[in-house]
């Protein structure tokens, strides 16, 4: 059994049981306890579980199965397309822009085709959109590949972002709370989003009406850190007013 298959079985087991000991996992998978410990360390770094004394448990934000990139792309597609088109219009020629992980940012990339801009991203779907476009300069951040979500994550991604200075970052999220907190549901992505915010002069949040309040328990930032919010007409008006009061611009696609 390959290490990737073994680690997938470990996560699957934790989804069923919630927690397991190193000894239990070693016996189930018929490998040494030291091998299991190494697997758990890798999965812990990737945010797929939490190491505990003598074993591991599924992190709360990973308790529900992740929605694949393809499934996410199908949800609210009309709203996402409208938001992406309006967001891309904010980009001026020769700008350096960071595109976050997610399906909305892939659509933004599609609208940037043929433009003399630099795109920095950890989103492999963005790379697919722009790889053959000679007008766009693409800078791909390093990291660990999350195949089901077409993204690069981890400490290498964060380290690369510390070397980046951009005009704009287009940030995605899983929810915008009524109190103004922008949230996500995956720990492995949350710190990367924060690093992207640090790397940009201006922050543009792309969030269709379905993201109000959406889901997620991990705070990425507050609306006070957002320069522009691009959304659709059904977004919660009180939350939009919070953004305006904090000095942000609200754009309705």
Image (spheres, rainbow, N blue to C red):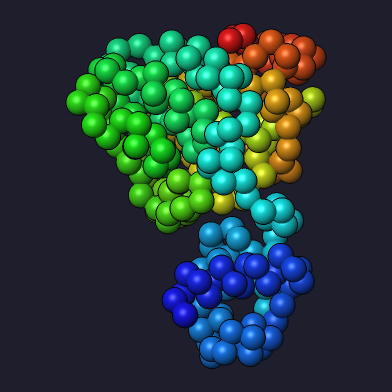
User: Which residue corresponds to the image point at 52% horizontal and 33% vertical from the top-left?
Assistant: 103
**Frontmost residue, 8 versus 77:** 77
Quadrant position of residue 247: top right
Q: Position of residue 218 (x, y in %)?
A: 69, 43
**Frontmost residue, 198 versus 152:** 152
Instruction: Determine whether 158 is above or below 174 in the image.
Output: below
Q: Where is residue 161 in the image (x, y as percent from the top left)?
A: 40, 41
Q: Where is residue 136 in the image (x, y as percent from the top left)?
A: 26, 25
The answer to whether 84 appears left or right of 143 in the picture is right
Quadrant position of residue 199: top left
User: Which residue corresponds to the image point at 62% horizontal and 9% vertical from the top-left?
Assistant: 252
The answer to whether 245 appears left or right of 82 in the picture is right
The answer to whether 32 appears left or right of 164 in the picture is right
Q: Position of residue 62 (x, y in %)?
A: 67, 55
Q: Can residue 99 be seen in this view?
A: yes
Instruction: Determine whether 110 is above or below 63 in the image.
Output: above
Q: Can residue 158 be seen in this view?
A: no
Quadrant position of residue 138: top left
User: Which residue corresponds to the image point at 27% horizontal and 18% vertical from the top-left?
Assistant: 114
The answer to whether 251 appears left or right of 24 in the picture is left
User: Which residue corresponds to the image point at 79% horizontal and 25% vertical from the top-left?
Assistant: 178
């Amino acid at each position: 059994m390959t290490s990737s298959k073994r680690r997938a079985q470990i996560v699957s087991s934790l989804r069923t049981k919630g927690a397991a000991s190193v000894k239990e996992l070693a016996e189930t998978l018929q490998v040494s306890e030291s091998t299991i410990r190494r697997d758990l360390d890798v999965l812990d770094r990737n945010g797929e579980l939490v190491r505990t004394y003598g074993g591991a448990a599924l992190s709360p934000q990973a308790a529900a199965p992740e929605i694949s990139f393809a499934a996410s792309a199908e949800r609210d597609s009309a709203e996402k397309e409208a938001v992406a088109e309006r967001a891309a219009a904010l980009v001026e020629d020769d700008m350096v822009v960071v595109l976050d992980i997610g399906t909305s940012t892939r659509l933004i990339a599609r609208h940037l085709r043929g433009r003399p801009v630099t795109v920095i991203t950890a989103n492999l779907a963005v790379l697919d959109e722009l790889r053959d476009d000679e007008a766009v300069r693409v800078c791909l951040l390093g990291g660990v590949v999350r195949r089901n979500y077409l993204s690069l994550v981890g400490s290498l991604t964060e380290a690369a972002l510390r070397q980046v200075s951009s005009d704009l970052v287009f940030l995605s999220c899983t929810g915008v709370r009524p109190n103004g907190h922008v949230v996500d549901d995956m720990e492995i992505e949350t710190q990367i989003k924060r690093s992207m915010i640090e790397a940009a002069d201006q922050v543009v949040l792309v969030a269709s009406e379905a993201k109000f309040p959406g889901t997620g328990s991990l705070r990425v930032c507050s609306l006070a850190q957002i320069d522009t919010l691009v959304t659709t007409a059904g977004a919660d008006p009180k939350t939009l007013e919070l953004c305006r009061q904090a000095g942000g611009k609200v754009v309705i696609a």
